[in-house]
Amino acid sequence: MTRHFFGDTTVLLGRSLRHISRSPDTIITTAIMPIAFMLLFVYVFGGAIQTGSDKYVNYLLPGILLITVASGISYTAYRLFLDMKGGIFERFQSMPIARSSALWAHVLTSLVANLISLVVVVLVALLMGFRSGAGALDWLAVAGIMILFTLALTWLAVIPGLTAQSVDGASAFSYPLIFLPFISSAFVPTESMPGPVRAFAENQPVTSIVNTIRDLFAQHQVGDDIWIALAWCASLLIVAYSVAMAIYHRKIS
């Protein structure tokens, strides 16, 4: 049964990736907005923002990476919505394939597409002067956090992809996620924020994730933020996966 599931998922993943390869504008569009934010904040606002960092792009990049993922997952909900409305899932259920493989194919496609977008954003950051003395293990830790974060948000995107009544409804849910980093330590230190805003910023998931990635890039001692970040990502992943699978099984039953 496990071999059956992995084989079916691999085949359907190939199908989804071929669709992505035929429309690379999806990945380009995903990366354009985070890159635009990075250019705007570094070259327009960066000189007026005091972060204690030698280069503002070094301070900014972790938050931009999260915005990249939040922007990319809207396409997962969009593609899933189109498949649901187009009857693809009903056709898959008439075939001898594992029921959840079609859903997992969408999730893994999102992971691959977002990782490519993240690489593009990092390359642009390097051109803008981003530098890090982080070693291989630090980069692997950053990659691990980003993969876990991407999976968590992708499963969250599956929910509107399955339940939305329109294309706009399927993708619009990502907008609050895109702007959540603005009320965190992603762009400015939380110490500069007024009381209630600071309280929210310091106790929402983006801040702990951003602080962890920033410390890894800067080779600083990683404190409790990493455990808080992992707890947020894992909790969101478990809840989103459980809800999405429950909705999916109800839809195809």
Image (tube, rainbow, N blue to C red):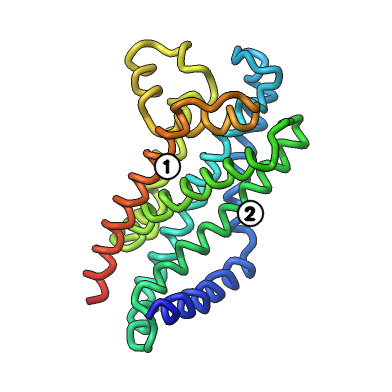
Q: Residues within 10 Å of mark 1 (few under 14, many from 20)?
A: few
| In this view, 14 is above or below 131 | below
Residue at 58% over, 29% down: 214
Residue 166 image offset from top left, x and y in percent:
34, 60
Q: Please name the amino acid that badge 2 sits on.
A: Ile
Residue 81 location, quadrant: bottom left
Question: Mark 1 sits on what residue?
Answer: 175
N-terminal of the pair, mark 2 or mark 1, is: 2
Closer mark to the observer between disc 2 and disc 1: 2
| In this view, 114 is above or below 186 | below
Task: Say whether residue 73 is visible.
Answer: yes
Residue at 48% over, 57% down: 75
Q: Please name the amino acid that badge 1 sits on.
A: Tyr
Q: Residues within 10 Å of mark 2 (few under 14, many from 20)?
A: some
Residue 43 image offset from top left, x and y in percent:
70, 24
Task: Say whether residue 49 is visible.
Answer: no
Secondary-structure class at tag 1:
helix
Q: Nearer the viewer, residue 131 or 117?
A: 131
Quarter of the picture containing the C terminus is bottom left
Residue 138 image offset from top left, x and y in percent:
63, 38
Residue 172 image offset from top left, x and y in percent:
39, 48
Question: Mark 2 sits on what residue?
Answer: 116
